Image (cartoon, helix red, strand yellow):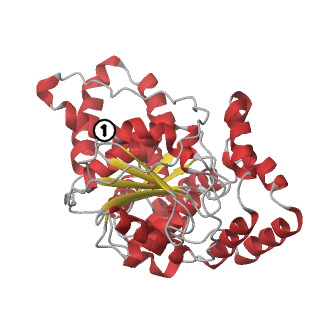
Amino acid sequence: MTDEQSPKTLQHRVDGPQDAPVLVLGPSLGTTWHMWDRQIPELTRQWRVLRYDLPGHGGAPADPSISTADLADRLLRTLDEAGVERFGYAGCAFGGAIGTQLALRAPQRVASLALVSSAARFGTPDAWRQLGVVVRANGLEQIALSAPERWFAPAFRDVQAAIVDWSVQMARAVDPECYIAACEALAAHDVRAELGLITVPTLVLGGAEDQVTPPADARALVAGIPDARLAVVPGASHLVPVEQPAAVGELLARHFEATWTEQPAVVAVPAQPAPVVPAPVPAAAPVRPVPQHAGGAAAGPDRYAEGDRTRRELLGDAYLDRAAEETEEAAGDFEDFVTRYAWGEVWNRPGLDRRTRSVITLTALVAGGHHTELAAHTKAALRGGLTPAEIEEVLLHTAVYCGVPAATSAFAVARRVIREETRPRE
């Protein structure tokens, strides 16, 4: 695809069955479509996957844009030329910003949305403009060399030298003027006041160790977007699709399977002749097997599996693995009951969203004086989209209806958990 042929569309490639619905994947600033390589085998089982490059990235034409809204329009024109009307969308960081613009500007075309390592506003405008000044004066070399520290957790960098080098080379190859324009676009991007207008089913996915768009940014998105769901991947930083490819692929597939209820018109997308540049293959994270409950197949393994997934999304793998080690064999039937009926059925009923269920649960636990469970569900409430301020407001309300002593104890438990969950990670 040349600049002369299509100056206001985006370089892209397509994989997957020609008769499948289309899923679009958007990249982070400084990366190319190859950041999604490890999700392609999983996602192309059901979708025709279209990946695009930002201007000046991955050999794409250097046609700068200083607006995420303009880039969303360019992507829509790209899809128009490909014959795609309705699509699902997952975008990482800058790609997530474009995704929010798509959901606001063309909600009738977006079947389902996933925002990965994203935010309603990325840092401060001054910081992005200052970064643009640095790039204009000194080029991208230092930005590229420091990219692995921003993108990957220390443990990952220690054992994945090839991927670290790949990330540096990828960032180094970006056109500087396009990078500066992208900094301007991020400086101007602020959709905090518009999140409530997003009606597209949304998954917000982030890395627990991300310092660029930390979990607090993900929780703010979930708090603002109606009925959005949150998934936090342990041990991952900013480029979570590269660090934890299997976990991200599974989360995206499950989200789009569950929320893409209205099948879009089937349109064959023509394959693009853009060359495929080999990229290092990240080590796949092991996929955790679904626990088998004691009741056998007749007792409803699908409900158990859904309950186990919900518990892990809200309470975290570490909490549940520790609880499993401490559970006596005789308590297995009770754990099976809780997983299937409380988490697999009640927590997943459509009548209330997860944020509302967390509010109810916190109130009930305060009333009952169940402080151990209160600590676990405070963490679950943060993962489910409640902000620390909202949790404290819930506890203040319980002081009136459950008693001041009960609320005082609850405040101590909740504040300890909030400090642990929101403190900066070294």
Q: Residue furthest front?
A: 4
Count the marks: how many?
Answer: 1
In this rendered view, identify the residue nearer to me: 147 or 153.
Answer: 147
Along the horizontal axis of the image, is 270 left or right of 54? Answer: left
**Identity of the residue drawn at 55% across and 55% down:** 27
Badge 1 marks a residue whose secondary structure is: loop
Question: Which residue is more in the foreground, 398 or 277?
Answer: 277
Task: In the displayed orientation, state which residue is furthest to the right.
Answer: 137
Rendering coords of residue 312 (x, y %): 41, 40
Going by the image, does 301 lie left or right of 41?
Answer: left
Mark 1: which amino acid? Answer: Arg
Disc 1: CA contacts within 10 A as few (<14), some (14-19) or many (>=20): few
Q: Which residue corresponds to the image point at 46% horizontal and 46% vertical from the top-left?
A: 376
Query: From this viewpoint, is residue 397 visible?
Result: no
Residue 121 lies, with reference to residue 351, above or below; the image says below
The residue nearer to you, when weighing 99 against 118, is 99
Q: Which residue is mark 1?
A: 45
118, above or below 14, in the image: below
Residue closest to the eye, 385 or 365: 385
- Residue 140, horizontal then vertical, whole percent: 80, 57
Q: Is residue 40 left or right of residue 300?
A: right
Q: Find residue 155 and report its image quarter.
A: top right
- Residue 338: quarter of image: top left
Q: Position of residue 67 (x, y in %)?
A: 58, 77
From this viewpoint, is residue 389 visible?
yes
Query: Residue at position x 46%, y 66% from top?
Result: 99
> What residue occupies the far left of the structure in this picture?
298
Q: Which residue is farthest top?
A: 329
In the image, residue 279 lies at what x, y percent? Answer: 60, 36
Q: Is residue 55 above or below residue 252?
A: below
